[in-house]
Amino acid sequence: MGLLVQKFGGTSVADVERIQAVAQRIAASREQGHDLVIVVSAMGHTTDELNGLARAISADPPRRELDMLLATGEQVSIALLAMALHALGVAAVSMTGPQVGIVTESAHGRARILEVRTDRLRRLLDDGQVVVVAGFQGTSSGAGGTPEITTLGRGGSDTSAVALAAALGADACEIYTDVPGVLTTDPRKVSDAQLMESVSCDEMLELASLGAAVLHPRAVEIARNYGVPLVVRSSWSDAPGTRLTSGSARPIGSEGLELGRPVDGAQLEENQAVLALAHVPDRPGVAAALFEALGKAGLNVDLIVQATHEGNSNDIAFTLASNQLDTAITVCRDLLAALGADGAQLSHQAGMAKLSISGAGIMGRPGVAARLFDSLSRLGINLRLIATSEVKVSCLVEGHQGAKALRAAASAFELTEQQLRQAPPACSPSSAAVCGVALDRDQVQVAVRGVPDQPGAAAAICRALADAGISLDAIVQSERTHGLAPALSRDMGFILKRDDRPGAERALAPVLASWPGARFEQGAAIARVSAVGAGMACTAGTAARMFRSLAAAGINIELIATSEIRTSCVVAEADGIRALQAVHGAFGLGGSTQHEAEGTEAPQTEAGGGSPLRPCPPASGAAP
């Protein structure tokens, strides 16, 4: 049989009885002939309790001492589980992260893994031992080369398990949790959420970055980057769970296991056009009516951006092939007339090109977008439109600058010719248009008003935030301009973590001070609902269906940001759960759930707060 890495979360080892049940499951796998490396989290809420003790002593405990404290939680779990295995007659040995050879950066509380030194692990496996490893922790070389205990951050046991599987070349990594697998959405908010049989790593990265906590995004990044076969299963049943699909196994480079190049491809799509509607009425149903009309005309819309607005009007921009522009103009004019939008403005431009970079966890690494924008601004390339997601950043540039922009991206991220593409990627019509829906209420919407409409402005903003360690979950550049040429300005909207808002304002203050009239502004409380699916680009009318479902529920859309496999809408915070339920229902993702069939309560999650996920159902027909 093969080598398996199995990870058990905190609720799976919450007490003695559960530890003994996990030991029996491991013993059964051992009897099947598998070599086993077992990764476990701290018992139950131990990490939270240790954090509470630390905060009772100090409001701001030293990060080094906090790592020393938190790392003890997993040591209790591994020792007890090893004892339980011995009681069943299974040879087992417990090991901490440092003992097993997990080497990390010297960043306490959020360290990334550099390498796994597997010599000791392999010797123990060759001796027939089951190796029980403490997740969430490793060791780094501190000052003077002295070893220091480090922790990987919330959800770090997932990361430990997949990193070990990658380093060992394991046949599979199995994540055992208290949910039956990846669900279409959070079953605590949508009672008929369904289990997915499979989901791609790119889809899972989007969902995980949007708050779905059944898997930590860093663990999914490792699985994607190194082709680790990954399965999410229930600790309480023998059901197969959800399989994550990725490419073939790849070797670990010299940059570090988690510090490999975050961008692994760039693409240029030429002959694009942008069409922008400014000052359209700000009310439910306008976006739905627009994209339904475009769909009925047989037009294939690509990127969609609805920007921050002032007063009672919105701006909506979208891209499509240049040869479809004339038809799109007619559709938009007819719609504006039907809406009675006398003050609306329609603008358009053909001969554009869309540059995209792709990779794992792009938006989780603050410097990536800044590096792209820096490289373009140095060549005098201005950005007409920006669209971002967890696995891709796209920007629209003048067509005659497209080839130069692609070369700039290749140079900035050290991409080979094989990693460059000058045509749209092959679409997979067999993939579901939408396989999961996520709700994130831990976000704030901010705007930077009065950004100069010139090369380098977006780069300056993103660089300032990156230098402060602040990641942006979405960037939306308004099509509406202010002032007169050559002193035109635009507004830019951002979605970022709630806790990062004060730091973002401080980081941007010096930049804005250099631009006359520029200012930082926080929007109203928001929730973000997102639909994710690999077949979205192949399925006409997906965005229109999402927008219509929100309009039918009387929910107004404040901001829209799309990529090839994700459409996100920002709505008022009070409307968040209703928006999630409406979008989930619109794509027919509901049904009788696995956890209901088993007679259990709605599951919790083990990777931190957020929404569990499910497997992708077959693609359903889309509205035009």
Image: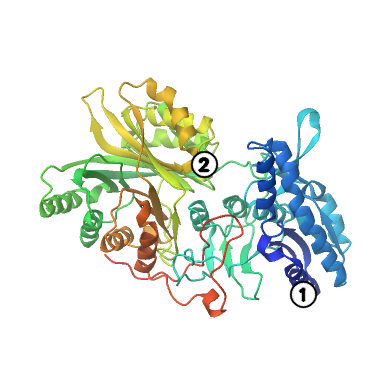
In the rendered image, which quarter contains the C terminus? bottom left
Give the foreground label among 1 and 2: 1
Residue situated in front as seen by the camera: 59 or 10: 59
Location of residue 603 by image quarter:
bottom right
At mark 2, the secondary structure is helix
| Secondary structure found at label 1 | helix
Q: Is residue 163 above or below residue 498?
A: below
Q: Quarter of the image holding residue 433?
A: bottom left
Quarter of the rendering containing residue 577: bottom left
Badge count: 2
The spot of residue 401 in percent (x, y) is 35, 33
In-image side of 338 versus 283 (left or right) = left
Nearest the viewer among 616 and 378 is 616
| Residue in the foreground of this view, choosing between 392 and 137 | 137
Indicate whether 158 appears above or below 272: below
Residue hosting label 2 = 417
**Label pair 1/2, CB-CB below 8 angstroms:** no
Residue 578 position within the rendered picture, expressed as x and y whole percent measured from the top left: 36, 62
For the point 17% across and 51% down, the residue is 332
Mark 1 is surrounded, within 10 Å at the Cα level, by few (under 14), some (14 to 19) or many (20 or more) other residues, namely few
The amino acid marked with disc number 2 is Glu
In three-dimensional space, the C-alpha distance between marks 1 and 2, rounded to whole angstroms, equals: 48 Å
Residue at left offset 74%, top offset 45% = 69
Find the residue positioned furthest to the front: 56
Q: Position of residue 171 (x, y in %)?
A: 70, 63
| Mark 2 neighbour density, 10 Å: few (under 14) some (14–19) many (20 or more) | few
Q: Amino acid at mark 1?
A: Ala
Residue 298 visible somewhere in the drawing: no
User: Could you tell whether 22 is left or right of 120 in the image?
Assistant: left
Q: Is residue 428 left or right of residue 298?
A: right
Instruction: State which tag comes first along the sequence, 1 or 2.
Output: 1
Label of residue 28 in the image: 1
